Image (cartoon, rainbow, N blue to C red):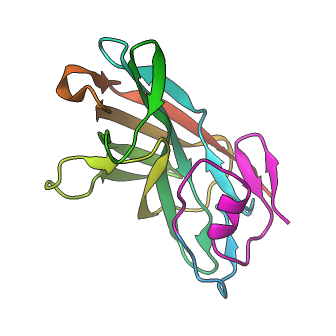
Amino acid sequence: MITARGNCLSRTMRASFVMLTALALPYTLAPASAATELRAIGGADGLHCAEKQGFYSNNGYTFANIQPCLSIRLMGSDTYQFAVLTDRISYYWGAAWYSASSDYPAGWRAEGSVSGGGETFTFSFPATVDPHYVYQKSPSGSEWADMRLPDVCGSGAVIVKMKFVQIGPYWGEGSVIETGEHTYPIDIPCE
């Protein structure tokens, strides 16, 4: 059974992340092998996330929620997954807000570092120079990267420092979200 506790999804998951979409989470999650048993850093099962933050563009016509998360790991491995989840990617036109779509996608990029247990991992989404942006054709999405960190747990056990830039949707380069560097502590419950 999967239960939600604040920003942490808990209990051992034996099926793929696809089960999470059935719970109506607004994120596209990376698939895992159904036969693989998974567990989280520090022994506490789940997807651990920093607080979600919302940002408006320079002219107030576009909006995005962003949330860095640290995912469960494969048993017997020190490889974890780090994700940037996006939600409510939208634009204002006329007298209403509209979601990003295939007709009016948003382009975003995020870069920074993840630190915990004396180790630091740097990331960049997208991981390649071309394309320069992650193109999002829906109001929510995610990008994932594998990383290595020692087992850690506790309040603020993992610190994410991240810059986020988004162009669009609809307004293109006339409506840009540039967050500058923000710090996001991620709590990892201990077993």
Q: Could you tell whether 127 is left or right of 184 in the image?
A: left
Q: Residue at x 53, y 71 (%)?
A: 78
Q: Is the residue 2 above or below the residue 115 in the image?
A: below
Q: Assign the N terminus to one quadrant of the image.
A: bottom right
Q: Assign the C terminus to one quadrant of the image.
A: bottom right
Q: How many marks?
A: 0
Asked whether residue 55 is drawn in magenta, I would say no
Asked whether residue 14 is drawn in magenta, I would say yes
| Image x and y of residue 46, in percent | 70, 59
Could one spot residue 38 in this view of the protein?
yes
* Residue range corresponding to the magenta coloring: 1-30
Q: Residue at x 30, y 24 (%)?
A: 178
Give the camera-side residue of 185 and 133.
133
Q: Could you tell whether 82 is left or right of 49 in the image?
A: left
Could one spot residue 84 in this view of the protein?
no
Q: Is the residue 69 above or below the residue 169 in the image?
A: below
Give the camera-side residue of 89 and 129.
89
| Image x and y of residue 72, in percent | 62, 64
Q: Main secondary structure of the magenta part?
A: loop
Extreme-bottom residue of the structure = 35
Extreme-left residue of the structure = 130
Q: Is the residue 45 above or below the residue 86 in the image?
A: below
Q: Could you tell whether 129 is left or right of 20 in the image?
A: left
Q: Is the residue 72 above or below the residue 16 in the image?
A: above
| Image x and y of residue 86, in percent | 48, 41
